[in-house]
Image (tube, rainbow, N blue to C red):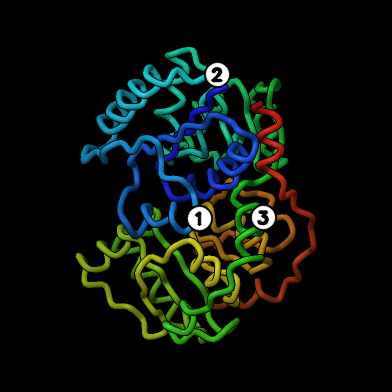
Amino acid sequence: MKVLSIVGTRPQFLKLAPLSQQFEMNGVNHIVVHSGQHYDKEMSEDIFDVLNMKTPDYLLEKSESVGIDRLCTMMKNIEKICLNELPDKIVVFGDCDTTLAGSLVAKNLKIYLIHIESGMRSYNKSMPEEINRLISDHVSDLLLCSTKDSIDKLNNENIKNNAYYVGNLQLELLKNVSEKYNNKQILIENKLTENKYALMTIHRDYNTNKYMLESIFSELTKLTVDIVFPIHPRTKNVIEQNNIQIPENIKLIQPVHYLDMTILERFCCYIITDSGGIQPEAWFLKKKCIIMRSETEWIETLENNNNILYDYTTPLGLFIEQFLKIDIIDINIDLCASKNIYNLII
């Protein structure tokens, strides 16, 4: 059997890593296609070395176009590879444009389609990711869910066959890395004291305009804790173009590779983020997480008081202070996702 996985963004590489190792251990003919959606050294390239993964079998040229034009370019290139490789099954991950491109190509070529992280819903159709995941779920042959509530969401959309809860590949990877990697040089370099700093990531469109960044920074100046902020290229561009002033308690640093990011997460006192991937990681690490969004796909991270959606009305400092007083309820997390997925695919 030949399995072809299609990835294009850093979170997808993280999900691919444990699954790729599972395929390799079991001798599966596994082809990896990198769509080129994210391709710069800071955000993508280094991760294959860091995670000791083989480089992709195919690396598509990053398209300078946007929107439908970029999607169509991706689809054409992926189709050529599929016609050359003739895979038995195609695996797509998550909800980015790469996911949608791979899903549409698989269906057009009548190739068995597997969608990992199925059933995630924000119910906000103004988000491109919501459209991508909806379409991919409704055309997939096998739907593999990272959260138990995703099964219910699929059932509500009348998707009741071939949908399974398998666990979260990214948390499986985080567990494995946390057990092996303890290099705290990133803390030393940035003069960070364990459990005495907050970690922040902000990159989504609705938070990275001049008004929102200035509003968020204004609130953050009132916090007494130092905040380390690995800055996304998009956010950095907005700050520079608008000459936005950075509060003294915020330490801007360049994007860090995955292993160092796990160190920043593990040894912070809490996390402020609008990232999808960091929400379950904070949940697994039992680090309180303030989500700078009005909705989230990761409902289960809210249920045990680990994560919370910011209401954008309460002063942020007060909001965080009140949230930190709430006790976290212990939960059990399934960390055998790659084995569960392998058994279902093969």
Q: Nearer the viewer, residue 92 or 124?
A: 92
Classify 275 as above or below 151: below
Q: Are marks 3 and 2 in contact (CB under 8 Å)?
A: no
Residue 102 placement (x, y as % from top left): 43, 28
Residue at mark 3: 301
Q: Is residue 32 above or below residue 168?
A: above
Which one is nearer the viewer's eye here, 147 or 11?
Answer: 11
Compared across the picture, whether 64 is left or right of 222 comes to left
The answer to which of 217 and 65 lies nearer the viewer is: 65
Crowd around label 2: few <14 · some 14–19 · many ≥20 (10 Å) = some
Measure the alpha-carbon separation of dots 3 and 2.
Answer: 31 Å
Q: Amino acid at mark 1?
A: Leu
Mark number, residue 51:
1
> Circles 1 and 2: CB distance less than 8 Å?
no
The 10 Å Cα crowd at callout 3, few under 14, some 14 to 19, many 20 or more, is many
SS at badge 1: loop
Q: In the figure, 35 relative to 85: above or below?
A: below
The label on residue 112 is 2
CA gap, disc 1 and disc 3: 26 Å
